Image (tube, coloured by chain):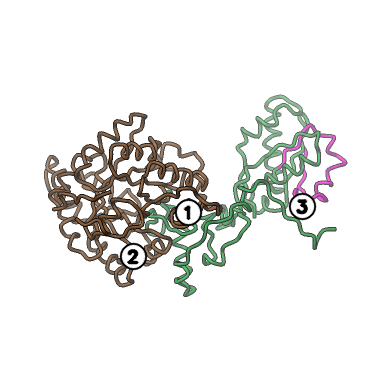
Chain colours: A green, B brown
Amino acid sequence: MIVADKKPIEEIIEEVKDYTSILIAGCNECVTVCEAGGKKEVGVLASALRMYFMNQGKDVKIDEVTLERQCDHEYLEEIRNNIDQYDAVLSLACGVGVQFMAEKYFNKPILPGVNTCFLGVTEERGVWTERCQACGQCILASTGGICPVSRCAKRLLNGPCGGSSSGKCEINPDLDCAWQLIVDRLKELDRLDDYEKLTPIKDWSTDRAGGPRKVVREDVKL
Amino acid sequence: MSTAVNTNTPSKLEKILAAGQLAVTSECGPPRGSDGEAIAKKAEMIKDHVDAINITDNQTSVTRLCSLAACIRLKLMGLEPVLQMVVRDRNRIALQSDILGAASFDIHNILCLSGDHQVFGDNSRGQNVFDIDSMQLIQTVRQMRDQGKFLGGDEIKRPPRMFVGAAANPFADPFEIRVPRLAKKIAAGAEFIQTQCIYNLDKFELWLKQAGDRGLLDKVAILAGLTPLKSAGMAKYMKNRVPGMDVPDEVVKRISGVPKEKQAEEGIKICVESIQRLKEVEGVKGFHIMAIEWEEKVPEIVEQGGLYPRPAVGE
């Protein structure tokens, strides 16, 4: 999923303080799972903002909605008929949702309520960690199913570096060394010989290096 | 000595190794400013006692005068530099470009490294590059030299002629891939290896033996890395705080066991004894003495280690 984290309330207040009618829009997908921008967080944020404006002596209308997704036309269309009631929308979707809504409602300020962090997993309740950087050319088949691009601090394709110590990364003793994990897994799979295969220089043109990316599938286009 | 040995490059370091002589290299860290004389001064202290001088490349991610400019300065002094190049700060365009820049001054040695993560340095919030890794940098230099081609495939007019080195840390984890990792660097094209500082000689010798068992020692020249300890505090710091460093308890105990004012002397003694022991070990082709901000001690270490005078090599 796309993992996001809540923005500090002070930063959100700074974004919305001059508006008098605000729609807070949650998203029922990734940000719900990572508890940053689902229906529950929309409710909590709405209460906090109402309290803030009440303390300021300002009469501000704050409404709540949570869309199934903010990265698809059909769900974003659901607010078309009432969006004109608001000065601004505070979207708690990831950066994708915020932008797609802004593209659709061109004359409306669409403000971000979360920081979009990475593609990751729920390791345990309240702890999310990164697994993928969407480089566009998956090499997991040759690295024992563990990604050095996203999990090695130097994204070394032929690691580890000299800073691997007792299974941990040199930059942070809480961080697993991705190459230790890869070696452990290759060993378990009885494929440690694969370690010695040199991974060639990577084509980063499918990563951000190639500019904004696009996937076109003629077979599924309408 | 004879110079009629076949070498791939005009590198003096390569010639000495090819002639079967023990090589001695050392390193100088460039200054945190634009005073090029600082490099010259450090080099002057050691130039008669070493065959080649590594110039570090923004080591520990602290911004310094660049390795390439410092190497050029050494070259202009008639010395033999080893250009250290990390892949942290430059993409493949910049790396190839700097290799050509070095080659244009006939810098004949390069050490290909990943580089410490920027979090350790003075720009911890900066971006890193890691377009290619150190293994792939070795391949890049070899391709440029041997095939005369850029990574993009185009022909290089006057290709670089560089003796290609890599680092190896026999003490980092996981230990079971330490020898395979060396094999991989050799397969990528590494011709010489400068190791991480060795304090655990037994473990180093075990690594060498395993490398020997795989037939790797004939394919690459291993220079044993040594850093003299200045104090008990430094020994403890290296042991506890530097990732991938193996300082055995007995070394810490030994240097802590002498009075403070004698600890530096003891550190030199440990270093010299290490040279004397490792000189006799099969597969050790030389020494890389990294006397960190202590370059003035290199001559006595080399002399006491029985590595002086250095062999003369014709161009």
Subunit ID for the residue under disc 1: B
Left or right: residue A181 versus residue B290 is right
Helix, strand or loop for disc 1: loop
In-front residue for pair A13/A216: A216
Residue positioned 56% across, 67% down in the render:
A141
What kind of element bears circle 2? Answer: loop
In this view, the residue in front, B236 or B99, is: B99
Q: Is residue A65 magenta?
A: yes
Query: Identity of the amino acid at label 3?
Result: Glu
Question: Looking at numbered disc 2 in the image, what kind of residue is underneath it?
Answer: Lys
- Check disc 3 and report the residue beneath it: A68
Q: Which mark is residue B201?
A: none
Element on which disc 3 rests: loop
Report the residue at 36% width, 30% height from top: B33
Residue B208 at x, y percent in the picture: 28, 65
Per the rendering, the mark at residue B148 is 1
Q: Residue furthest bottom?
A: A190
Tags 3 and 1 touching, CB below 8 Å: no
Q: Residue B219 got which mark?
A: 2
Question: What span is in magenta?
Answer: A63-91
**Residue pushed farthest front?**
B4
Name the kind of residue labelled 1 in the image: Gly
Mark closer to the observer (3, 1): 1
